[in-house]
Amino acid sequence: MTATKQVSPTEDQLNLRRLADNSLVIRFSGNWRMQDGLPSFHEAKKQIESESGLKGITFDTQGLSSWDSGFITFLLKINELSSRLEIEADETGLPDGVRRLLHLATAVPEQKDARRKVVREWLVSQIGKKAMAGAAGAKDMVTFVGEAVQAFLDLARGKARFRKTDLWLTIQQCGAQALPIVTLISFLVGLILAFVGAVQLKQFGAQIYVANLVGIGMAREMGALMTAIIMAGRTGAAFAAQLGTMRVNQEIDALTTLGIAPMQFLVLPRMLALMLMMPLLCLYADLMGILGGAFVGVTMLDLGIVEYFNQTKEALDVTDFVIGLINSAIFGVLVAIAGCMRGIQCGNNAAAVGNAATSAVVTSIVFIVVSDSLLTLIYNALEV
């Protein structure tokens, strides 16, 4: 949209002259189009307000060549000013088309409360609303988790209703199709751990202990953690988008109408798939991370491949892998819960689907980090 150019009033376009009968004649001439530049209303306003004792305003448009909406806007401001100053404006001298447009513009008066009022909200009120929203969100989360537990109990009793094909399809999406990204990220994480350890251990001539650092770090912590974060961004967001789209298309409402519990039919297969696949992906991530550390150890630290893997075998214990598998299974449940919960809670428009996917990733990562911290404290308390 082209912005209106403003120029000072000149004799060429605008001339204001006071008559003997205390009326003011506003003479328009030339082109009154926005692309040609329009006189500034501010200057005309100052001149009108400076004239005391005015009884009326008339218009002379005999010299007017062309006009557009900028001319109408200028006249509306003149009429508003004359009304405020209690001066009668005579529109007889205006062209017929201009008078009709002015009549249309002023036919419906502006509502008093139509303009948006900016009201600053008190800080206490903002905190209260945030607290209430947080409490409502916590209640919805507890309700969803309770329904998920009930769905697992129904599965244990053989009463859960879902299609086996959906479960196998979700297992394929969460398992085999996730291998490429898990391979890349885990290998690079192993490289990074080896680099970080080598910088310090080289100072003491203890490069061989890079194998211990990478092996224990991947088996106990980084394998499960990085896999969970990958699945949160890849699978958790996909679950939220799928269920959110079903919510928008009213497919979830249709299932409820048919007497099929969405928690069993939609959420349960996804949770089962992630619970089953996450430990396997975690083991695979441990292997790729160890290989990444071995690549650094062999190519940059002058360690033998057999020597490196023997050191890794001596450093690791079955307990280390068990801890990683337990973490990965818990992370899988949390990612599935976050993704499915945000999808089920999605609104009924396209923007809500995008927000649900974003919220699912954020919620999943928060769940993962908090649960990982708690699990680490528990393992330290148990001295494992």
Image (cartoon, grey):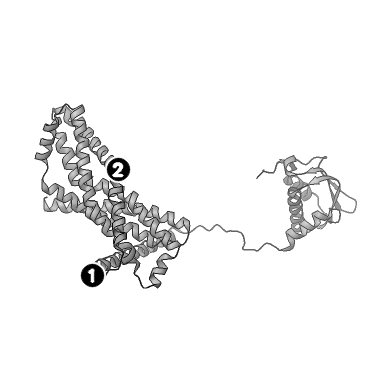
Mark 1 closeness class: few <14, some 14–19, many ≥20 residues within 10 Å = few
Q: Which residue is mark 1?
A: 158
Seen in the picture, residue 118 relative to 149 is either above or below; the reply is above
Mark 1 belongs to which amino acid? Gly
Of pointers 2 and 1, the one earlier in the residue sequence: 1
Q: Secondary structure at mark 1?
A: loop
Q: Which residue is mark 2?
A: 180
Seen in the picture, residue 245 relative to 201 is either above or below; the reply is below
Q: Residue at x 23, y 38 (%)?
A: 190
Query: x%, y% of residue 79?
Result: 76, 55
Q: Residue at x 20, y 47 (%)?
A: 283
Locate residue 351 relative to residue 38 in the image: left or right.
left
The image's mark for residue 11 is none
Query: x%, y% of residue 11?
Result: 83, 40
Mark 2 belongs to which amino acid? Pro
Seen in the picture, residue 252 relative to 316 is either above or below; the reply is below
Does residue 335 appear in the picture of this structure? no
